[in-house]
Amino acid sequence: MQTLATTPPTVLETRIAALIEADGPIDVATFMTLALGHPTSGYYPAHARLGASGDFVTAPEISQIFGELIGLALADAWRTAGAPAARLVELGPGNGTLLADLWRSTAKVAGFQTALEVHLVETSPTLRLLQAERLAPVERLQWHGDLTEVPADRPLLLVANELFDALPIRQFLKEATGWHEIEVALDADRRLCLGRTARPSPLGAGLPAELPPGSVLELSPAREALMADLAERLRAQGGLALIIDYGEAEPTPGSTLQAVYRHQKVAPLTRPGEVDLSSRVAFGPLARIAREKGLRVFGPLPQGDFLARLGSGLRLAQLVRGATAAQAAALEAGHRRLTASDGMGTLFKVMAVTSWPSLPPGFVAEEAVA
Ligand code: SAH
């Protein structure tokens, strides 16, 4: 059987190879931007398939409980904040499942849905079509290509699940001479390969000098820029944001760039445009950006603890009561996957950023990272 790596280059690999031939190697962030976002052959516009029959599966695709409880948590925070007219924003809504579940679960919260305008920030035209179909019941729904396009007037209730992990990262390799940036170059057969800059990178000055040669560290200017924009809005407009992703409080050495094709991990340069790329989110640098704006930051808290505190066990029991034996088994398996340590319960984390004085639902005091 032919492996992915030995198949002919994808359309996008050929384009990237031509670019490198003309202008020299590109950094990992540029590679990710092209592989995920190229308008005609990037993964999200051209090939993204989420769910059991697609390439990867996310929490809302696993269990309706996820979107339902996030909806109730946001509605609760909104009510405590005095029930203001607000903007509900989702960054990177995928199939629209989280928002569909959120909308259903909050239908009976008095005044909540009528107080909202709903904004989806989505770069992929194909996923926008799926979202429009899925979210037909949601009123006052608008799409934007970037958070900067969302009106800057009212408090925000924002959720981003597995969006930060898709934003580009830059990678650096420690050598005796300093931190060199890892690049995507061409090998003798004109296929993509990893290399590194001949000279140390100026960005290396901000990286720890004490790590041994061979260490890899990642930075994500794209994530930090998004966080800065979001934090400025929360400061000026007020509101609460829940950022949910896989990762850790602080960056850990090693490459975390991961490519997934039909639920299998493949090498990161394999078939660009046809595989999903992501990397672990380091929450600490994002938390510091928000705190510098005077916001309160909670977490990152393990997803399993967050969902349990929001009552996922009770919601599961409620759903199981009305289910057939087969449905009950599926509901229990989904809930287990979201909350168990050997599933997504520990690796995935939730960070809350807010301008509001009350404790965000699901969090307890003094959980903030340093
Ligand atoms: N939140 C969804 C989907 C996660 S996949 C879920 O939990 O199922 C990542 C999503 O982010 C996709 O919808 C993708 O098209 C979108 N996306 C990727 N890069 C983006 C960017 N820079 N701005 C906005 N959306 C982006």
Image: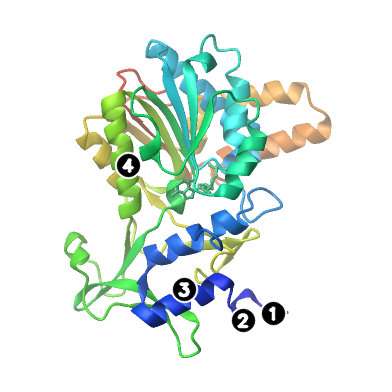
| Residue receiving disc 4 | 227
Q: Secondary structure at mark 3?
A: helix
Q: Is there any visible trace of residue 139 in the rendered image?
A: yes
Q: Does the CB distance between marks 2 and 1 fall below 8 Å? A: yes
Q: Is there any visible trace of residue 370 in the rendered image?
A: no
The disc labelled 3 sits on which kind of residue?
Ile
| Residue receiving disc 3 | 16
Task: Please report the residue visible at 60 percent of the width from the left and 37 percent of the height from the top.
Answer: 96
Task: Please report the residue visible at 66 percent of the width from the left and 48 percent of the height from the top.
Answer: 51
Give the mark toward the camera: 3 or 1.
3
Residue 2 got which mark? 1
Q: Give the alpha-carbon distance from disc 2 to disc 4, as whole Å.
A: 39 Å
Q: Secondary structure at mark 2?
A: helix
The disc labelled 2 sits on which kind of residue?
Thr
Q: In front here: 227 or 1?
A: 227
Task: Please report the residue visible at 46 percent of the width from the left and 53 percent of the height from the top.
Answer: 166
Disc 3: CA contacts within 10 A as few (<14), some (14-19) or many (>=20)? many
Residue 313 got which mark? none
Q: In front here: 54 or 130?
A: 130
- Residue 153 figure quarter: top left
Residue 6 got which mark? 2
